[in-house]
């Protein structure tokens, strides 16, 4: 948390970013990009701004209740909400022109009222709480509370270039302090306030910033040197690069996606990482999948999902149209699993994954697939719990093809 207030201009940026997200529905990463581009902000100040924005969005309904401000009133009444946030976190009030003040006694009364409402206190919208209770039962309150915490910073060691111990030592020399993450052989947690991407260690491709839970998903693929492997929903390729390192850069690793710009970004990251066995391919039609029928040792399907396991990192998703989009996403997941599974050869393994902790997108999908596809068998699955691990939330299921369809 901040130890001092932001500058007046930074406070104004916070309100502008929040307004762009809440009034115009802009994704948070794009709102940051729009406001930060062209500004000469020090990395530390930019980090402080994102810290405040992220914390407010993680518990937006709480801060709106404390300040008596509606989300759509951010442009007009945002200074009042920001004052409430500062007082709630025992920080000096920010210096801003035309700041709308808040009565400390009224705020104290509202804080006591909020404490009696656990769902509000955890910054959870009603629709998400209802879904969580229905799908997760007694496990949900702990997960709900965990999802309002700030996301930790994790690194994945690029074992193509160094060991985890060598990475930790190199980063320490550049002023970045890390600790080993038990249970995740490639992971380090960053425990200092450091500009990671300005380090020589990053420029040399020794690490990627990747949540420890995400690293576990990639490791579950158990890719070996010489295999033919497909990351079928690769995106910008965080898991692709992890898989390449597992393969020691040997064998064929095909990264596929429906968006070319993501694959272009992946190519740049792969060059820096020395992941020379990565090929990229746009999914232009179903023919792209058909050509690979029964040819792959491993297939990773990190399917589009609600993102309800990574709300610490993407808190704006709480306040978007997720309930309306979820049925569409569930149907898309079903289609991708049915279609893309054709690439797995007999004896090969499919890993189905999401960044959600909701059974509807996870085990329910897997069970429905297995009921219709007797040529696959269930090996094991795992839900990576934010409450139990401190990581982001993920799900993975390992399935083996035991016969042709």
Image (cartoon, rainbow, N blue to C red):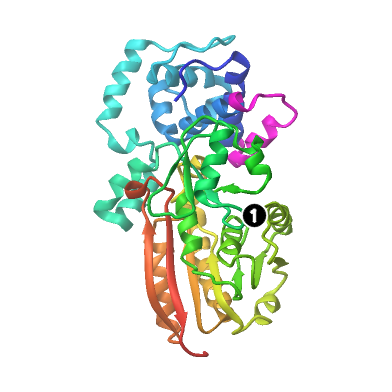
From which residue to which does the magenta span run?
24-45
Residue 249: percent from the left, percent from the top?
64, 65
Q: Quadrant of residue 271?
A: bottom right
Task: Please report the residue visible at 73 percent of the width from the left and 59 percent of the height from the top.
Answer: 260
Instruction: Name the residue nearer the viewer: 301 or 86.
Output: 301
Is 273 situated left or right of 91 in this image?
A: right
Q: Eyeballing the image, is 120 above or below 291?
A: above
Residue 293: percent from the left, percent from the top?
62, 83
For disc 1, the neighbor class at 10 Å (few under 14, some 14 to 19, many from 20) is many
- Verify whether residue 40 appears in magenta: yes
Instruction: Name the residue nearer the viewer: 206 or 126.
Output: 206
- How many numbered dots are placed on residues in this image? 1
Is 249 situated left or right of 129 in this image?
A: right
Label 1: element kind: loop
Residue 117: percent from the left, percent from the top?
27, 34
Asked whether the viewer can see residue 25, the reply is: no
Q: Which residue is mark 1?
A: 236
- Verify whether residue 263 appears in magenta: no
Q: Eyeballing the image, is 323 above or below 367?
A: above
Asked whether the viewer can see residue 132, the reply is: yes
Image quadrant containing the N terminus: top left
Question: Going by the picture, which residue comes out furthest to the bottom?
Answer: 404
Instruction: Name the residue nearer the viewer: 96 or 80.
Output: 96
Task: Please report the residue visible at 42 percent of the width from the left and 68 percent of the height from the top.
Answer: 397
Instruction: Name the residue nearer the viewer: 225 or 75.
Output: 225
Task: Please report the residue visible at 36 percent of the width from the left and 11 percent of the height from the top.
Answer: 104
Task: Please report the residue visible at 57 percent of the width from the left and 29 percent of the height from the top.
Answer: 47
Residue 344: percent from the left, percent from the top?
55, 80
């Amino acid at each position: 948390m901040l130890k001092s207030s932001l500058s007046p201009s930074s406070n104004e940026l916070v309100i502008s970013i929040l307004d762009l997200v809440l009034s115009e529905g802009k994704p948070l990463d794009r709102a940051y990009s729009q406001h930060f581009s062209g500004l000469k902000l020090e990395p530390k100040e930019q980090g402080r701004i994102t810290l405040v924005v992220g914390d407010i969005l993680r518990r937006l309904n709480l801060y709106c209740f404390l300040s008596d401000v509606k989300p759509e009133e951010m442009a007009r009444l945002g200074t009042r909400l920001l004052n409430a946030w500062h007082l709630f976190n025992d920080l000096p009030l920010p210096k801003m022109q035309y700041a709308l003040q808040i009565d400390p006694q009224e705020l104290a009364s509202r804080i006591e009222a909020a404490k009696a409402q656990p769902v509000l206190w955890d910054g959870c919208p009603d629709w998400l709480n209802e879904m969580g209770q229905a799908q997760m039962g007694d496990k949900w309150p702990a997960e709900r509370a965990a999802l309002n915490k700030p996301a930790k910073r994790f690194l994945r060691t690029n074992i193509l270039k160094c060991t985890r111990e060598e990475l930790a030592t190199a980063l320490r020399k550049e002023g970045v302090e890390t600790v080993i993450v038990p249970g995740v052989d490639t992971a380090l947690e960053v425990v200092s306030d450091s500009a990671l991407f300005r380090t020589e260690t990053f420029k040399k491709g020794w690490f990627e910033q990747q949540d420890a839970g995400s690293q576990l998903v990639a490791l579950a693929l158990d890719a070996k040197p010489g295999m033919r492997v497909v990351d079928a929903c690769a995106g910008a390729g965080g898991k692709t690069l992890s898989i390449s390192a597992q393969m020691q850069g040997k064998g064929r690793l095909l990264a596929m996606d429906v968006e070319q710009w993501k694959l272009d970004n992946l190519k740049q990251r792969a060059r820096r990482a020395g992941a020379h066995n990565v090929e990229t391919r746009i999914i232009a039609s179903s023919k792209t999948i058909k050509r690979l029928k029964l040819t792959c040792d491993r297939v990773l399907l990190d399917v589009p999902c609600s993102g309800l396991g990574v709300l610490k990192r993407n808190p704006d998703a709480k306040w978007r149209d997720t309930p309306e989009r979820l049925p569409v996403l569930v149907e898309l997941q079903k289609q991708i699993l049915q279609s893309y599974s054709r690439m797995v050869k007999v004896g090969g393994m499919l890993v189905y994954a999401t960044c959600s902790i909701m059974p509807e997108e996870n085990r329910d999908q897997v069970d429905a697939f297995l009921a219709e596809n007797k040529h696959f068998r269930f090996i094991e699955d795992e839900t990576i719990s934010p409450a139990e691990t401190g990581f982001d939330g993920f799900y993975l299921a390992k399935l083996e093809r035991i016969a042709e369809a």
